[in-house]
Structures are given as structure tokens and as C-alpha cells.
Image (spheres, rainbow, N blue to C red):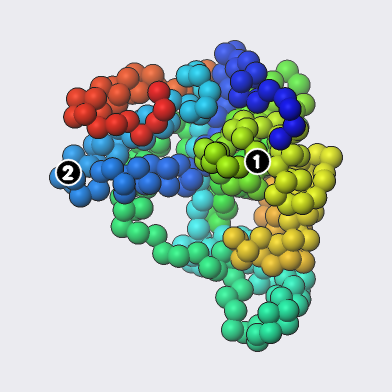
């Protein structure tokens, strides 16, 4: 990181309109789950554990990003939604139909010295099964989120696609619209979202994972400059704007998603919707745009304070930094 102040130390959070805090729901599930697994599970009755998990969700959602001062946000959540028929997303259909993907897997198999039919070539094909604890935390969180915050998902799409759609709405809306004028914090540990960062539209990457002490990049909130530094450090390439990340992901592949190098850019591009799977056509309803243009915050400070008291009452350390 160059010698400059961290963005989380210098940003002036706005109040009118309230910043849009876009949370990757599935990522936050794991934040709550990690706390639950290490601090709670098996120590209380299931009924008490459910109340504590709900309290943890209230703390995570209403604290705001923990590396920033407490503030009022228009908090919304975006979530993955696998197609029940295929148990996967549109990218899996795309991979199965794409000759370029098939050729990329053939080349990969040759490099590895194995037969291509011995490899799991479907999208995210190396991901493991979810645990009972995951489903416990997920269910409580989803109920709480849907009750008190705008919660969005679309069948066959990932949270990545919804984040990309929100960024496009910000970029293409009238300059006087709230969604175009407001600050947008994209909160996840998924670095694919970095390609959406744009200083002109006040779209920032809010890293949900705390930087480890030995990491070179120590900035939690990043604009374009911070993202470009991360790309050079981690991907070993130089880009002039975050939107160029997808091109290099295509060249390098992303085995976390089970996408080998040489896969089509459409598999990685969040800035530009695939014409055959354009989520904007489904997501941009009148209600959705009205919510994005609503300047009012959704932060529930009363829920936060109530959860703080709940944890203090039983002498259990709260799972967020106050």
C-alpha cells in the first residue's frame, strides 16, 4: 500500500441521502456462524442459542462496517439463490453450453496430465456441503433480515449479480436521482465485487474480513486506488480501473469458483450483464428502484442497543467491535 491515509480514516459519511450499505448475505452468515461455532454452540439450550444468534444478527447489521464509526445506513441484503431444479446458478448453464469453457477444461486437463472426464467441471463444483449449524444461523438471519431490511435475491443468480445490477443502476440513473448521488458501500469478502468500485459514482469496497497483521494491504475500505493496489499485489497485473479485473480473471481463471484459465470473460464480468441472463430485467421493478432511491436509513439502533444489553446481561462478549 502506498504511503497515504486509509480511506476508512478519511471518508466523510453522508446523511442525506443515507449511504447504501449493500451486504453479501451469505458472507455475513459465515461471520455469525464463526462466532456461533466458537462461542455459543452446545453451551446453552437451543432456544437460548436461537435468541443469541438473532441478537448477533442485530449487532452485525445495525453496527455498520466495524472499521467505521457507527452511522445510519440504508442497509440492504443481497443473497445467492440456486435454481432448485439444477442446484446451481446461471453460470453453470453457461459453462455447460460454452465451447470456450469446454476447450479451457480440455487444456487444463492436458496440463494436469489427467483425463478431462475425471474432473468436476461444473460451476463451483468443488464446494462442500453446508453444515446443520450453517442452516441454523442462515434461517434465523434470513427471517430477521427479511422482516426489518430490504432483502433481494433472484432464482439462478448470485449476490454478485445483484451487486453488479445496483452498481449499473447507480451509473445509469439520472444525475439528480438518489441512487446516483448516494454513497454505496459493497460489503463482502468476495473480491470479485472490486470490479464494481468507481470513485465518480462513490461506490466503495467494504471488506467484511478484517485484514491480518501480516498482510501488505491493510485498508478495509477501498476506492479505486486501493483496489488497483490490491490487484497489482494479488493478481500481479496493473490495471487503470477496477472494471478491467474481469479480463485478467478470464486469463488467470478462478479455481475458487471452479473456473479454469481461458474461460470466457462473461463468466467473471459483473460490470456488464450477460445479454441472455440480464438480471436487470428481473430486478429493476418499480418497488426496487423506489427502495434504491429512498434516502432514508434502515439502521435499527434500538435493536443494536437491545442486543448489547442482552449480551451484557449474561456476560457474553458481543461478536462485533463496539
Q: Position of residue 1 (x, y in %)?
A: 71, 35
Q: Looking at this rendering, what residue extends furthest in the front direction? A: 214
User: SS at mark 2?
Assistant: loop
Instruction: Determine contact: label 2, label 1, CB under 8 Å.
Output: no
Question: Measuring 32% from the left and 30% from the top, which residue is drawn there?
Answer: 318
Q: Position of residue 130 (x, y in %)?
A: 39, 60
* Label total for image: 2
Question: Which image quadrant is residue 283 in?
Answer: top right
> To which residue does mark 1 refer?
216
Left or right? Give the position of 245 relative to 222.
right
Q: Position of residue 157 (x, y in %)?
A: 57, 53
Q: Position of residue 74 (x, y in %)?
A: 52, 24
Query: Residue 177 versus residue 242: which sits nearer the camera?
Result: 242
Q: Residues within 10 Å of mark 2 (few under 14, many from 20)?
A: few
Left or right? Give the position of 248 relative to 92.
right
Q: CA distance from mark 2 to mark 1?
A: 40 Å
Q: Residues within 10 Å of mark 1 (few under 14, many from 20)?
A: few
Q: Looking at this rendering, what residue extends furthest in the bottom direction? A: 115
Left or right? Give the position of 214 relative to 113.
left
Question: Which image quadrant is residue 132 in?
Answer: bottom left
Q: Looking at this rendering, what residue extends furthest in the top direction? A: 16
Q: Tell me if residue 165 comes above or below residue 86 in the rendering.
A: above
Q: Tell me if residue 171 comes above or below residue 193 in the rendering.
A: above
Question: Measuring 53% from the left and 68% from the top, which residue is drawn there?
Answer: 126
> To which residue does mark 2 refer?
44
Query: Residue 93 versus residue 208: which sits nearer the camera?
Result: 208
Q: Nearer the viewer, mark 2 or mark 1?
A: 1
Q: Is residue 96 visible?
A: yes
User: SS at mark 1?
Assistant: loop
Return the disc, 2 or 1, that comes first in the chain's sequence. 2
Amino acid at each position: 500500500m502506498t504511503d497515504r491515509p486509509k480511506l476508512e480514516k478519511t471518508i466523510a459519511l453522508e446523511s442525506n441521502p443515507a449511504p447504501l450499505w449493500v451486504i453479501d448475505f451469505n458472507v455475513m452468515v459465515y461471520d455469525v456462524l464463526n462466532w456461533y461455532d466458537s462461542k455459543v454452540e452446545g453451551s446453552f439450550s437451543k432456544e437460548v442459542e436461537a435468541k443469541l444468534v438473532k441478537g448477533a444478527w442485530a449487532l452485525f447489521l445495525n453496527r455498520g462496517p466495524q472499521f467505521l464509526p457507527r452511522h445510519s445506513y440504508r442497509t440492504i441484503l443481497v443473497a445467492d439463490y440456486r435454481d432448485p431444479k439444477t442446484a446451481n446458478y446461471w453460470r453453470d448453464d453457461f459453462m455447460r453450453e460454452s465451447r470456450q469453457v469446454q476447450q479451457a477444461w480440455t487444456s487444463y486437463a492436458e496440463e494436469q496430465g489427467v483425463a478431462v472426464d475425471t474432473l468436476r467441471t461444473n460451476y463451483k463444483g468443488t464446494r462442500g456441503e453446508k453444515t446443520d449449524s450453517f442452516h441454523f444461523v442462515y434461517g434465523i438471519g434470513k427471517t430477521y433480515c427479511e422482516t426489518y431490511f430490504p432483502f433481494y435475491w433472484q432464482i439462478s443468480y448470485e449476490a454478485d449479480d445483484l451487486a453488479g445490477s445496483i452498481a449499473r443502476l447507480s451509473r445509469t440513473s439520472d444525475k439528480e436521482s438518489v441512487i446516483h448521488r448516494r454513497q454505496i458501500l459493497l460489503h463482502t469478502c468476495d473480491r470479485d465485487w472490486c470490479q464494481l468500485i468507481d470513485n465518480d459514482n462513490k461506490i466503495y469496497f467494504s471488506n467484511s474480513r478484517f485484514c491480518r497483521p501480516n498482510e501488505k494491504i491493510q485498508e478495509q475500505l477501498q476506492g479505486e486506488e486501493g483496489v488497483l493496489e490490491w490487484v497489482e499485489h494479488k493478481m500481479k497485473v496493473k490495471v487503470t480501473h477496477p472494471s478491467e479485473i474481469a479480463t485478467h480473471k478470464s486469463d488467470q481463471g478462478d479455481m475458487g469458483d471452479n473456473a479454469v484459465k481461458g474461460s470466457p470473460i462473461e463468466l467473471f464480468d459483473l460490470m456488464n450483464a450477460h445479454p441472455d441472463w440480464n438480471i436487470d430485467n428481473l430486478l429493476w421493478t418499480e418497488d426496487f428502484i423506489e427502495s434504491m432511491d429512498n434516502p432514508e436509513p434502515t439502521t435499527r439502533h434500538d435493536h443494536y442497543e437491545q442486543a448489547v444489553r442482552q449480551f451484557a446481561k449474561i456476560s457474553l462478549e458481543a461478536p462485533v467491535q463496539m
